[in-house]
Image (cartoon, rainbow, N blue to C red):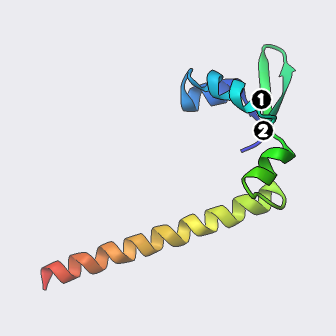
Amino acid sequence: MQPISSKQLVETRGSGVYEHLKELRQLDFITHQNVGRLKIFNTTEKFQKYFGIQGDVENLKQRLFSKVRKTAKMSESNHTSQIVTKLN
């Protein structure tokens, strides 16, 4: 989810995130803007190219969520099949 604040990152990943952010900045994978006391982070084009991310972020989110839903449905279906097999 972009952009994201340093506060949100710390709440999600813990205080160790500061070291990760430092490394990502050194690699030019992220940029930040100061907004008051917060820093707001975004990934760079270099990040997108390195990790093979193409297209706009919203389209990417939709594709990702679609794959997650399909995987969850397949996992649920396989789990149900295993239960039925064990019962027989």
Amino acid of disc 1: Arg
Residue denoted by label 2? 29
Pick out the residue farthest to the bottom: 88
Up the image or down, 73 lies above or below 59; here it is below
Up the image or down, 57 lies above or below 72; here it is above
Residue drawn at x 83%, y 61% is 55
- Classify mark 2: helix, strand or loop: loop
Residue drawn at x 77%, y 19% is 38
Residue 80: which quarter of the image?
bottom left
Compare residues 18 and 51 and report the one nearer the observer: 51
Pick out the residue farthest to the left: 88
Structural crowding at the residue carrying mark 2, measured as other residues with C-alpha within 10 Å and reported as few (<14), some (14–19) or many (≥20): some
Residue denoted by label 1? 25
- Classify mark 1: helix, strand or loop: helix
Residue drawn at x 62%, y 68% is 66
Compare residues 84 and 30 and report the one nearer the observer: 30
Q: CA distance from mark 2 to mark 1?
A: 6 Å
Tags 2 and 1 touching, CB below 8 Å: yes
Compare residues 79 and 30 and report the one nearer the observer: 30
Instruction: Return the x and y of residue 1 as percentages of the image width and height.
Output: 71, 45
**In this rendering, position of residue 85 left or right of residue 23:** left
Amino acid of disc 2: Phe
